[in-house]
Image (cartoon, helix red, strand yellow):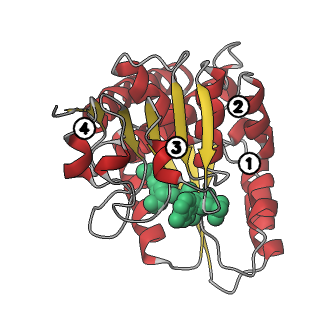
Amino acid sequence: MTADLMDGAALAREILGQVAKRAADLTSATGVTPCLATVIAGEDPASVTYVRMKQNRSRKAGIASRHVGLPATATTQDLVGAISELSADPAVHGILLQHPVPPQIDERAAFEAIAPHKDVDGVTMHSFAAMAFGDPGFASATPGGIMRLLDACEVSPSGRHAVVIGRSPILGKPAGMLLLARDATVTYCHSRTRDLPVIAATADILVAAVGRPEFVRGDWIKPGAVVIDAGYNPGNVGDVAFAEAREVAALITPVPGGVGPMTIAVLLDQTMDAAAAQVTGTPGAGPG
Ligand code: NAP
């Protein structure tokens, strides 16, 4: 078997086209340009690149960017203060704090300074609880992108065994919760999991969110499984050994061009939801 590719790049283009149309409509109807604020503490080269990519995509979609850069020596108080100002600013509709922050900063405190109605990256406890309870709210962007990709490929999680490798608050944990909300039977694996290959081999849907290049091998995969590689490591390498896995799986996300573009698409789509809700007060235009 050679797996079909789950084309996140194509789906993201489609979503971004719709975002651009919604942004143009909102601006012509109200005179307000949707605005996403990006915040970085420090100058980690990968973070700077990610934020630049997000700003470029925003611009192309007709969403304005506001950038706040803090030095690597910034304190928790500095970062919380900067984010609180953006939370209170009516011209800003969504806020993205680029992860990770320098080690002296309490990242959770910084995330919690994002007003829930501007949490378009889905990183606050408010958004996390909404995902856990299956309530309306902004999805964590990468897990939200994974769910949309599954839907576009007509993969129903209901009743399937989903194994998520990784339990980070922004990726693994919310990915499992969104799968659970869609009636998958979910198993989380992490660095203390025993017999990981044996558990992975029982997955109908396998999500790799580990941060280790080609960690998941082809012989860990159940024939006919759906393999979602959320990993992104230097050299455009995912967390799954792609060539091996493709010979066993039915569907697989490539790296690049799978989950990565979907993350930005969901971020900007949710920015549009936030802007529409804040500008027009339209019921149902908010997080959901
Ligand atoms: P993270 O915070 O470092 O979490 C990694 C997770 O993997 C942890 O839960 C860890 O377990 C687990 N893990 C590490 N080594 C393991 C092992 N040997 N066996 C089993 N589990 C192991 O990373 P993250 O932020 O979730 O990111 C994960 C990957 O996704 C990275 O490649 C990152 O670049 C990528 N990513 C991509 C996007 C995108 O837009 N495509 C967005 C975010 C992240 P413990 O909890 O036990 O430590």
In the displayed structure, does residue 251 sit left or right of residue 130? left
As measured in the structure, the alpha-carbon distance from the residue carrying label 1 to the one carrying label 4 is 50 Å
Q: Nearer the viewer, residue 29 or 159?
A: 159
Residue that carries the numbered disc 4 in the rendered image: 248
As measured in the structure, the alpha-carbon distance from the residue carrying label 3 to the one carrying label 2 is 25 Å
Lower position in the chain sequence, tag 3 or tag 1:
1
Assess mark 2: CB under 8 A from ligand 1? no
Type of the residue with mark 2:
Met
Residue 199 disc label: 3
- Dot 4, crowdedness within 10 Å: few (<14), some or many (≥20)? many
In the displayed structure, does residue 145 sit left or right of residue 171? left
Q: Nearer the viewer, residue 72 or 35?
A: 72
For the point 36% across and 20% down, the residue is: 152
Type of the residue with mark 1:
Asp
Determine whether 30 is above or below 5 in the image. Answer: above
Closer mark to the observer between disc 1 and disc 4: 4
Residue that carries the numbered disc 2 in the rendered image: 131
Residue that carries the numbered disc 1 in the rendered image: 89
Q: Are marks 1 and 4 in contact (CB under 8 Å)?
A: no
Type of the residue with mark 4:
Val
In the displayed structure, does residue 103 sit left or right of residue 224? right
Type of the residue with mark 3:
Ile
Determine whether 143 is above or below 192 in the image. Answer: above
- Dot 1, crowdedness within 10 Å: few (<14), some or many (≥20)? few
Q: In this view of the protein, can residue 10 be seen by the observer?
A: yes
Image quadrant of ligand 1 equals bottom right
For the point 36% across and 44% down, the residue is: 261
